[in-house]
Structure formats: C-alpha cells, structure tokens
Amino acid sequence: MIIDTDPGVDDAFAIALAATSPAIDLLAVSAVYGNVTLAGTTANALRVLAATGRADVPVLVGAERPLVHPQPHRASHVHGADGLSGRAGTLPEPGRAAEPGDGVARLAALLHATERPVTLAAIGPLTNVALLLAAHPSVRPKIDRLVVMGGGLDGGNVTAAAEFNVWSDPEAAHRVLAEEDVPTVLVPLDLTHRCAVDAGWLDRLAESGPLGAALVGLTPSYRENYRRMLGIDGMVLHDAVALAEAVRPGILRTEPMPLSVECSFGPGRGAVLPDRRPARVREAAGRTGRPVDVAVDVDLAVLREFLLDRLATARPSGAVSPAGNR
C-alpha cells in the first residue's frame, strides 16, 4: 500500500491504521498540500509515522498547489494551525527526513520497482495522483486499485456542493475520477458522516495504550469543530473510513456509477456528479463513462469496532504518550 495524504487529524488516524496493520506492507506515504501547507503536511506525516514506530516508511514530497487554480483556503479552522489541533509537537521528532527530490517521480519509480500490485489510498486533494497517472501512465498496471476519500453525492462540507479534497483541486479530481481507467473506490461524505464516532469510542481508544492516547490527544480542534457545526460530542473519521476499505476490502458496500466533477467557477465548483441512471439509459444517451465503485453503506457497528480494535491493539515500537515521550 501507498498512502497519499495531507495530514490532518483524520489522516493521522488513517496513517496509523495502515502503518500498524500486520497484513499491510506500507511502501511509502506521499504528502500533498491540503489541510495545511505542503511543509506542514510533510512534517505531520513524518511525525505520525514516528509515533507508530514506522520511521522506516519513506515520506515523499508531492505537489504544493493544485493543477490549475490556487486553493482558496486551508482547513486550519477545522484541524488547527498545524493540522493536528496545535499538538503536532506532542508527537516524537521524525526518525528520518523526507525523501529529497520530486515526490511524484519517486512515487512512479516505487511503483515500477514493486513486484506486486499496490493499493493506492488517496485521502487528500488528488493533485499527486493526477500528475502521477498523466506523466507516468505505465504505472497504471501496478495499481491494483485506488481508494479515494472525497466528494459528496448529495452535498459538500466546504460549500453546499463540494467536499474539501475535491474542492481543493476539481480539475485533478475530474481527471482521476472521470477520465482514468484505474479500478477506483470512492468513499464520499454521505457515508463518512454516518460513521462518526462518539466521546465514548474516543475514550476507549485513549485508554487502550500510548498510541491510542497520542491519537486522541490530536483531536481537540477537530472535535470542537464537530461540536460547533454538527452538535455532536465526537468526530468524523473521514480518511480512516477510506483506509478501513483499503485495509479490509469489502468492509464498505459499494455501487458502480460513472462520475464527473464540476470544474466551473459557479456555486457548484468541486461537486461530484454521479450518473445514477440505469446503464441502458446511459447507453441510449451515448453517456457510458467508466464506473467508479462508490461506497454507499456499511454495518456501522462492525466498522467502528474494526477501527477501534486495530488502533487499540496496535503495539508498534516507538509509540508515544500524549506528552510526546517515548
């Protein structure tokens, strides 16, 4: 597996899930701008890997801006100024530096070198993935499937239409979700919001050990956002839901449907538009499109217990306490 990410509190949970799963060979984490600047997301990825005892995993430095138009704003009002509720410093100093040079080219080289197909979990803006597939099309056969967290079929969280990851670079999202032919699973807001965890779940994780306590210690700004916006004492683990599907294929129920992404500058910019018409209707209209497997349902109790069990029972070397001590 390779994770492309913009940590982010929920990204931290997602990285930890993959990094500590014994069945996952985590080849690399590639950073992209998003919740905070590229420098911030790179530093956060390195710290989360150090906290999970996985300083052996290389961090690649990807795109610092969208393909075409500037990103209008970051998500510091949700994730805190450093992306981790102002608590990035509670995690250990990275055990290694980020890999030098072009992260997308390094990502392509890594895929070419692997002997087994790779799951690419993309849980930030899709700029790195769009660049990878456009500039290095020969890597497509090496990607077993692409698992994307992004979009909202019935509305967004940044605007009425758009979810943050897709809204940050709609042009890249359209290329990846509508124009590529890599097998893809999309995990949208419609499902992740239903998978929110409450204070009791977070308390159980915090009490499970040093890693769980460290992860929950990163959540104050994120939890306050959901308390203010949704009136819940808990939070939505968007990216960890997508990683659950990447780690355990089939835990989410999916339906295939062609997608497009609105790239105009109207109020719908960044909207993911599913074509839910029957295949015969699409074919008659000359609009076939390649299908994306969109996650539409899950057994919530099974998913929450899976996430808690994996994160709570992880015992990586080098896990830290909430104060950042080994």
Image (spheres, grey):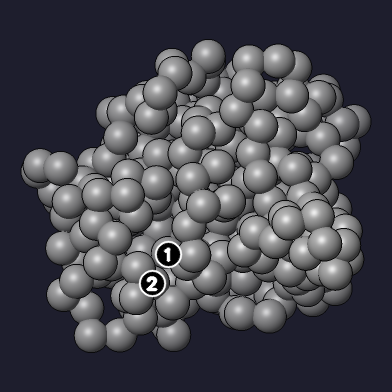
Image coordinates of residue 50 in percent, x first then y, are 30, 54
Badge 2 or badge 1: first in the primary sequence: 1
- Residue 29 placement: quadrant: bottom left
Q: Which residue is mark 2?
A: 143
Disc 2 to disc 1: CB gap under 8 Å: yes
- Residue 79 placement: quadrant: top right
The quarter of the image holding the N terminus is bottom left
Which structural element holds mark 1? strand
Q: Which circle, 2 or 1, is nearer the viewer?
A: 2
Q: Nearer the viewer, residue 305 or 193?
A: 193
Residue 278, above or below 44: below
- Asked whether residue 249 is in view, the answer is yes
Q: Label 1 amino acid?
A: Leu
Q: Nearer the viewer, residue 218 or 322?
A: 218
Residue 311, above or below 116: above
Q: Judge the density around disc 2: few (<14), some (14-19), many (≥20) Cα neighbours within 10 Å.
A: some
Q: Which residue is mark 1?
A: 120
Q: Label 2 amino acid?
A: Ile
Image coordinates of residue 113 in percent, x first then y, are 16, 75
Q: Is residue 259 left or right of residue 217?
A: right
